[in-house]
């Protein structure tokens, strides 16, 4: 029987209320600010985009909402994941989970899958859906309620969906790049509890300086920076070119699907690299040590 | 299950579990057949929890250990599909609702019956929508037993399941265990300090002392083997000369003193008092304290 699905479901049952808040609160704040705040659009900007402004505002609303929720979800997920090794120890329910017929590796993998992949992806989609509402309020304030219904949805939606698809496809790639750092912090939190972030930060900072100054070897800083940069590229490889296209006017919307596909291709092309191979090996080693830690910790209370 | 001994659910042979240099379980050998309710007795630190953890694969032992035909450590997940385990009191996750736990266990445990769990919960004051953190300790234990008793398993392992509960909660727990789970085929291994309360439920007893198994016997055989003699203080010296396992005050009856012997004492010693059935508690004390101790002087 596949034990992973119920373990994934456990995450939903435990965090669903928090996730609902994570989506609802930023959207509600945005809607309130748009409804009652002051909205200023520069005359030059308005003149440059001309009658395409409603469409661009709609796309910006949806993309912006999605991006904000995606970033919030990603950061909160990384914080949850960092503490996952010890999360069931505070109420001693770890004893309950260990009494169930699920393997240690499945029990550790489930929260990683949920928090690193499914939650940010779901937040992104929720952000896009919420962005429809945001666009309605924004357009009502700027150009009038009726304008929203006259938007060229058949032109807009492919662009919006292509952006979403690009981010969704890039998410697992970014997690692959970040996996050595994420797994290291999870492992450190198993051993050193809340000191894990401090140890990681100090370790990388001091280690980089030491290697650089004493041995003239910038390996650690290069690797860390390389992983972070590649993770960013996995999500948006050519962010600059996208910005340029967007400011060129409404015509650029039609090019977004092509851009997204091309950008994803660039991100995929980066995958076969020694940095990623080494990083994945390191992450797998950390995961193995976590499984051992859970196994040994299980018997420690005897 | 062991193919050679189909009625044996658990077989340990020269099993030891060490934490560093200390042997928490030291060279123990025993079997648990089908349909038995076995009490695991021992002082704090005697190795009960360690032995139980070894039996469900949560700690590594040396020697041979077979539980339902599985090697517990490498086959923990498979074993726990056929055995259920309550490792401590009130350890259900506090964030969960009871119905969440039913839903989770339905997915994780192939032998779990959600319908049966709901039916068992109806016997308690725990509601399906109740959050664990709102329940009293006794209610959490009841809920946990209802969940575990809804597993169609062959063996249940309970480690101090009623520790710290009031007498009503303990009574309710054992009633549910006996009425709803034990069927003559399934076995239970239970460790507890409330020995008097469960003595009448037990069919067998395992006693651990400093990691060593000092007794593994059915209660039926225990009554045949161990003999108590109630006697007056005036004959205490003569009784002591016969080297009983334990001399103690009973606090009841006209004589007020008693001694426990392993095997029938000599005729002349029996004649000094009245033969009584030693309780499990007295026998536990006799076997887990140093024999030279004389508990008639408090």
Image (cartoon, rainbow, N blue to C red):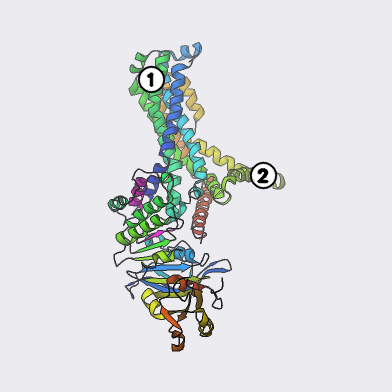
**In the picture shown, does residue B152 fall above or below B215?**
above
* Residue B109 highlighted magenta (yes or no): no
The relative height of residue B126 versus residue B110 in the rendered view (above or below) is above
Q: Is residue A108 left or right of residue B129?
A: right
Marks 2/1: CA–CA distance:
50 Å
Mark seen at residue B163? none
Bin the neighbour count of mark 2 within 10 Å (Cα to Cα): few under 14, some 14-19, many 20 and up: some
Whether A3 is drawn above or below B259: the answer is above
Q: Same chain, marks 2 and 1?
A: yes
What residue lies at 34% left-to-right and 61% top-to-bottom? B82
Q: Is residue B20 visible?
A: yes
Would you name the residue on which mark 1 appears? A136
Secondary structure beneath dot 2 equals helix
Residue B204 location, quadrant:
bottom left
Q: Residue at x 46, y 41 (%)?
A: A173
In the drawing, what numbered circle is on residue A206? 2
Q: Left of B298 or right of it: where is A163?
A: left
Q: Nearer the viewer, residue A54 or B137?
A: B137
Q: Chain of mark 1?
A: A
Find the magenta span and give its range.
B82-108
**Relative height, residue A155 to residue A278 (above, below):** above
As helix, strand or loop, the secondary structure at mark 1 comes to helix
Name the quadrant containing residue A197. top right
């Amino acid at each position: 029987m596949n034990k992973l699905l119920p373990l994934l479901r456990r995450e939903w049952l435990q965090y669903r209320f928090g996730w609902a808040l994570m989506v609802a609160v930023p959207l509600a704040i945005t809607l309130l600010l748009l409804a009652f705040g002051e909205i200023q659009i520069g005359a030059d900007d308005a003149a440059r985009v001309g009658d395409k402004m409603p469409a661009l505002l709609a796309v910006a609303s949806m993309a912006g909402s999605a991006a904000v929720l995606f970033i919030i979800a990603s950061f909160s997920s990384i914080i949850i994941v960092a503490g996952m090794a010890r999360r069931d120890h505070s109420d001693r329910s770890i004893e309950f989970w260990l009494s169930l017929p699920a393997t240690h590796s499945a029990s550790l993998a489930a929260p990683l899958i949920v928090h690193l992949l499914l939650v940010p992806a779901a937040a992104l989609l929720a952000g896009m859906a919420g962005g429809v509402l945001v666009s309605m309020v924004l357009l009502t304030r700027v150009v009038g309620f009726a304008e929203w219904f006259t938007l060229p949805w058949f032109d807009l939606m492919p662009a919006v969906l292509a952006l979403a698809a690009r981010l969704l496809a890039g998410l697992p790639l970014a997690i692959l790049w970040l996996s050595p750092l994420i797994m290291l912090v999870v492992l450190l939190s198993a051993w050193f509890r809340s000191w894990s972030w401090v140890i990681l930060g100090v370790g990388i900072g001091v280690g980089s300086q030491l290697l650089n100054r004493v041995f003239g070897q910038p390996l650690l800083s290069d690797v860390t920076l390389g992983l972070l940069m590649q993770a960013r590229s996995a999500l948006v490889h050519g962010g600059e070119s996208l910005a340029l296209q967007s400011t060129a006017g409404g015509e650029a919307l039609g090019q977004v699907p092509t851009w997204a596909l091309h950008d994803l291709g660039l991100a995929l092309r980066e995958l076969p690299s020694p940095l990623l191979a080494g990083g994945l090996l390191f992450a797998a080693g950390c995961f193995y040590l976590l499984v051992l830690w859970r196994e040994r910790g299980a018997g420690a209370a005897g | 299950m062991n193919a050679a001994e189909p009625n044996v659910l658990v077989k340990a042979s020269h099993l030891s579990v060490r934490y560093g240099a200390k042997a928490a379980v030291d060279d123990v050998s025993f079997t648990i057949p089908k349909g038995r309710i076995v009490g695991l007795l021992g002082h704090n630190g005697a190795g009960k929890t360690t032995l139980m953890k070894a039996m469900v694969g949560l700690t590594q032992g040396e020697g041979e250990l077979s539980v339902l035909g599985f090697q517990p450590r490498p086959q923990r997940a498979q074993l726990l599909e056929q055995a259920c385990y309550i490792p401590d009191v009130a350890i259900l996750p506090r964030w969960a609702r009871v119905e969440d736990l039913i839903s989770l266990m339905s997915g994780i445990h192939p032998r779990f019956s959600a319908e049966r769990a709901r039916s068992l919960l109806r016997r308690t004051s725990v509601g399906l929508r109740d959050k664990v953190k709102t329940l009293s300790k006794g209610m959490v234990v009841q809920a946990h037993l209802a969940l575990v008793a809804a597993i169609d398993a062959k063996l249940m392992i309970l480690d101090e399941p009623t520790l710290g509960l009031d007498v009503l909660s303990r009574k309710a727990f054992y009633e549910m265990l006996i009425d709803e789970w034990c069927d003559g085929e399934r076995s239970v291994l239970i460790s507890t300090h409330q020995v008097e309360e469960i003595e009448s439920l037990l069919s067998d007893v395992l006693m651990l002392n400093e990691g060593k198994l000092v007794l593994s016997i059915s209660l039926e055989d225990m009554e045949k083997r161990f003999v108590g003699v109630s006697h007056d203080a005036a004959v205490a010296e003569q009784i002591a000369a016969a080297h009983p396992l334990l001399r103690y005050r009973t606090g009841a009856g006209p004589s007020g003193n008693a001694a426990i012997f392993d095997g029938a004492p000599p005729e002349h010693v029996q004649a000094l008092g009245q033969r009584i059935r030693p309780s499990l508690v007295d026998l536990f004390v006799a076997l887990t304290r140093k024999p030279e101790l004389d508990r008639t002087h408090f």
